Image (cartoon, grey):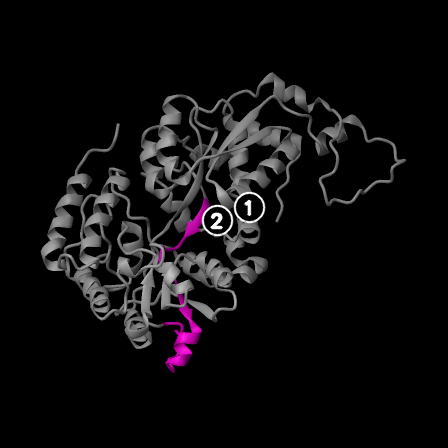
Amino acid sequence: MSHKMTRRQWLKGAAAISLGALSAQILSACAGGVAPAAPAGEAETKPAEEPAAPAVEQAESAPAPSDVTLRVQSAGGVLLVMPTEFAKRYEQETGIKVIVEETVYGEIETKTQTGFISDTLQDLVYGHHRWLFINFLKGIYLELDELFASNPPPDFEDIYPSVLAGNQLDGKNFSLPETVHPGGNIAVNYNKNILAEKGLAEPQEGWSVNDWRDLATAAADPDKGIFGLGLDDFTALHYYSNVARCFGPPDSTDSWVMNREGTKLTLDNAVHKEVADWYLGMISNKVVPKRADYVENSAANLFTAGLSATHASIAGNVANFLNTIGDAFEMDAALLPLGPQGRQGSCYSGNQYMVNSKTKYPEETYELLKSFTSAEAGIFSVLESKLQPNGHKAAWIDPEVNKVNKIYGRLDSFLSKGVEPFPMPNNTRFTEANNTFQAEMALIWEQEVTWDEHVKVITEKVQEILDLPRPA
C-alpha cells in the first residue's frame, strides 16, 4: 500500500491544515526544475529519445529541492532502518531534506526534555508510553486533534481504536503509533522438543493460566537445570499488568494494578494475592527461575539456550527467537492464556512519533509523521527489520508480515476487540512509580520477603508518588 504524494498534493494538504503560510522558499520550489534520476531498481518507462515533459509535469513527478530541513529523533540499531528509508522517500517525494539522528534509547526521555529546553530538539521526536504523557504535559509535543480532523492520515480508520485511545491524555491526541505491543508477555513461546520428550501436549487455543502452570511444572527438570516457565519481566508495572489482568472476573478491573483514574495503587487485594500465589508456587518448586539462574542476566536467554520449556515475551520476539534458535530445537508460540475465570489479560504499550511543538515547520513535520506511521511503514518495519507492526490493522494482517511471524495475524482479533490501557499514573510520573514498584516487587519474587509482609510496603511507597501533583 503506497501513499506517494506529489509536490502539488503535499502543498494542498499543508494548506488544508491551516497552521500558517508556507515559506516563500517552499512556494518557489514548486516552479519546476530538473527531475532527479529514477531510484535504484526502478525501470525506465520512456524511450530516451522522447521529448521532455512540460515543466508543470516535471514539478508534479519530481519536486525541486526545498530550503526546509527536518530533523528526526530515532533510536539506534534496527530501529534506524525504517526512519532512514522513509526519510529518503519523503525527500524524493517532496524535495524536503530529512536528517535522521540517532539517540541512545535509554537516554531519549531525558534528552527530549533537555533538547526542548535548549531549543535543540528534533522536529519529529520518538517516544514510549513511559515518558509520552509527562512530556506532553511539559509542552514538548504538538497537540494533533485539529490536524487529525482537517488533514487525517491516510487510512486513519484502519488504526485500532484502543491503540489511538491508549495514546491519549485527557482525551487529547499528540502522537501516532510506530510500534504496538498488546502486552509485554503476550506470546508464550514453547520448546516443542522438551514437551515431546516429556509426552506433554502443546498449548491449545482457550488454555488457562493454570494449564500453563501445570504444563510448566511437568516440563521442568531441576536436576538438569531446565525450567518450565519464564517471563520477559514480572516487575515492571506494564509487564506485571499483562499477566495479572488474566485474573479475576472478566467484567472486573480488580486485577489492574491501579484504579481507572490512575490515582490509587490497588495491589493489596485478593486478586493480586492470587497472582502472587500462582507465581511464587512455581518459584518455590524451581519451575520459574530466579535472577541467579538467568543466562547473561536474561530469562529469555534461558529459553533460546534450550533450558526453559516456555517463555512469555512480546509478540515480536517470536521471530527473534526463531532466528536465534535456528535448528537447535523446534519451537512455536501461543497467545497468553486466559485466567481462571476466563479473563484475557492485555496491556497496551509501545512507541510513538510526535511533532516537536517548537518546530519551525509544523506542516512539513506533520506530513513526515504520517509517512513514518503509515501502514506501509508498519509493514516495512516487520519485513526489513523483524520489528513489530504499528497501529494499522493492515500491517498486522498483511500476508508477507505473517510469513515472518504468524502470531501477528492471530493477534488481529485480539487488537480489534481492544487492548487494555497502559498503567499510567494520573500525574504521569510513571518512571518514578515504576522504578519503585520494580525494586520492591523483585524482593518478593527473589523470596527475600513474603507477599503478605511486603505488599503494604509497596503500596505505601508507590502511593506516595501517585499522590504527587502533575509536573508543571
Query: Eyeballing the image, is 468 above or below 422?
Result: above
* Residue 180 within the segment the image draws in magenta: yes
* Residue 299 within the segment the image draws in magenta: no
Residue 68 visible? The answer is: yes
The residue that disc 1 covers is 377
Residue 58: x, y in percent?
75, 30
- In front: 32, or 278? 278
Query: Eyeballing the image, is 353 above or below 23?
Result: below
Which amino acid type corresponds to the residue marked 1 in the rendered image? Ala
Is 239 displayed left or right of 8 in the figure? Answer: left
The residue that disc 2 covers is 390
Residue 7 tag number: none
- In front: 121, or 104? 104
Residue 245 visible? The answer is: no
Q: Residues within 10 Å of mark 1 (few under 14, many from 20)?
A: many
Marks 2/1 in contact by CB < 8 Å: the verdict is yes
* Residue with the most extreme left position: 453
State which region is magenta. 178-206
Q: Residues within 10 Å of mark 2 (few under 14, many from 20)?
A: many
Point 31% across, 54% down: residue? 239
Which amino acid type corresponds to the residue marked 2 in the rendered image? Asn
